[in-house]
Image (tube, rainbow, N blue to C red):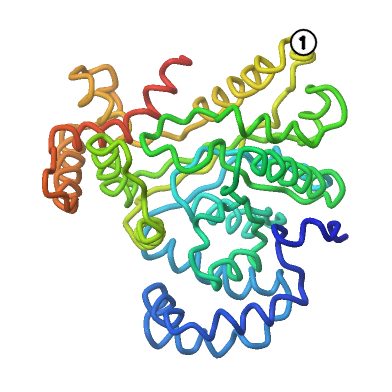
């Protein structure tokens, strides 16, 4: 089933669009360099020769994306695990809403591990601010991504949000496909994962019934993502200082490209993705004022995400280093503390600021690793 043509500028590509899009992608000189980084030179050359006959989304995900994701996983991770697939109903679309750590890999790991386990992959929401070259837009849209447009006046943004909301509802309710959506616009750079109310309000815009019925239709299914090591931690800390020192600081498109490259190929250690049971939407929320309805849902979503983090030693260590206490000391050893501290100090050396505030930057990096443990501990 196809979506109406008014969504053509944001929708994922169809099968007949795959081959022309691939031809455009392969015409880019940087593609062979990117593939060589992931696969190695000789493997990349062979891999490039196998791409021409690909004519469908399924073939592209099976022959290209799964191969690249497997290579990234083997190079940069010690283990990636997906839990909770027993909560997936194959007859329905699920709106997987997760915390957001990595621009590419949050949805990438979810989809490739759904694929490994025999489930259909999801459509993926991606901001147009990341589509800095036309070939990147082609690449993501043949990988079942749809575009979240983030520029325009307030009036234009309302229309854009409504259109996005309608598209997501059509995919879930009519096409019975699943969707991945981050709980907020952009990554939570301090790992304090709180759902943005505007995301919930956007989802409600396309509903024609009560708030409760509108949300139930979406089959919202929380996903908790945690990385043992975040390769972009030093870049996130750097941005915190830049924003502190300059109220007008804005990232450049080049910053997003660097974050994508670093996230893809940097060391991640263990990675966990935990799917929760679909949310139970409370009937009494209909009685709340409109603003409080979105708030009530976001709090339940946050609780599910926080409760289901699979935490690593680094999270507990950082929480104790931040507080100066020993509340979590039963979860790690002295040697693991030394390893983590050494890792943080090495990451700090990568921050190329002329006025580097090491105390501030170190604290910010500790917060990134500590906040999942702190948020989960509040629920115990």
Crowd tier of the residue under label 1, counting other residues whose Cα lies within 10 Å: few below 14, some 14–19, many 20 or above? few
Q: Tell me: 306 left or right of 113.
A: left
On screen, residue 62 above or below 129: below
Pick the front one: 23 or 62: 23
Q: Tell me: 281 left or right of 52.
A: right
Q: Tell me: 171 left or right of 25.
A: right
The residue shown at (61%, 84%) is 23
The residue shown at (75%, 35%) is 219
The residue shown at (70%, 31%) is 278
Q: What quarter of the picture does the N terminus occupy? A: bottom right
Q: What element carries label 1?
A: helix
Residue 357 appears at what percent x and percent y?
13, 38
Pick the front one: 39 or 84: 39
Residue 142 appears at what percent x and percent y?
66, 68
Residue 3 appears at what percent x and percent y?
84, 57
Pick the front one: 286 or 117: 286
The residue shown at (26%, 30%) is 318
Residue 49 appears at what percent x and percent y?
55, 90
On screen, residue 232 above or below 334: below
**Number of on-image labels:** 1
Q: Quadrant of residue 356?
A: top left
Q: Tell me: 88 left or right of 368.
A: right
Where is mark 1, residue-wise?
A: 284
């Amino acid at each position: 089933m196809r979506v109406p043509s008014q969504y053509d500028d944001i929708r994922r590509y169809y099968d007949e669009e795959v081959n022309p899009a691939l031809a455009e992608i392969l015409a880019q000189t940087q593609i062979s360099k990117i593939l060589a980084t992931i696969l190695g030179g000789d493997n990349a050359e062979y891999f490039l020769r196998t791409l021409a006959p690909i004519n469908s989304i399924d073939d592209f995900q099976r022959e290209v994306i799964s191969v690249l994701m497997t290579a990234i996983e083997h190079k940069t991770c010690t283990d990636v695990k997906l839990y909770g697939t027993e909560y997936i109903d194959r007859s329905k679309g699920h709106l997987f809403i997760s915390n957001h750590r990595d621009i590419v890999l949050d949805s990438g790991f979810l989809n490739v591990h759904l694929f490994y386990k025999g489930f259909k992959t999801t459509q993926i929401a991606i901001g147009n601010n990341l589509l800095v070259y036309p070939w990147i837009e082609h690449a993501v849209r043949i990988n079942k991504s749809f575009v979240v447009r983030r520029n325009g006046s307030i009036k234009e943004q309302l229309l854009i949000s409504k259109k996005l909301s309608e598209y997501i509802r059509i995919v879930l309710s009519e096409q019975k496909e699943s969707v991945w959506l981050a709980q907020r616009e952009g990554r939570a750079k301090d790992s304090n994962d709180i759902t943005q109310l505007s995301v919930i309000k956007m989802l409600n815009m396309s509903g024609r019934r009560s708030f409760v019925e509108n949300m139930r239709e979406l089959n919202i299914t929380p996903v908790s993502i945690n990385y043992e090591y975040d390769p972009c931690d030093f870049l996130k800390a750097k941005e915190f200082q830049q924003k502190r020192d300059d109220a007008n600081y804005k990232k450049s498109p080049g910053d997003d490209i660097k974050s994508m490259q670093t996230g893809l190929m940097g060391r991640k250690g263990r990675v966990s993705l935990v799917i929760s049971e679909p949310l139970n939407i409370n009937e009494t929320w209909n009685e709340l004022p409109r603003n409080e309805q979105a708030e009530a849902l976001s709090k339940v979503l946050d609780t599910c995400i926080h409760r289901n983090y699979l935490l690593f030693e680094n999270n507990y260590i950082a929480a104790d280093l931040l507080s100066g206490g020993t509340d979590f000391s039963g979860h790690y050893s002295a040697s693991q503390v030394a390893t983590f501290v050494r890792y943080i100090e090495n990451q700090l050396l990568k921050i190329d600021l002329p006025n580097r505030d090491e105390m501030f930057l170190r604290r910010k990096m500790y917060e990134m690793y500590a906040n999942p443990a702190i948020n989960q501990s509040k629920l115990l």
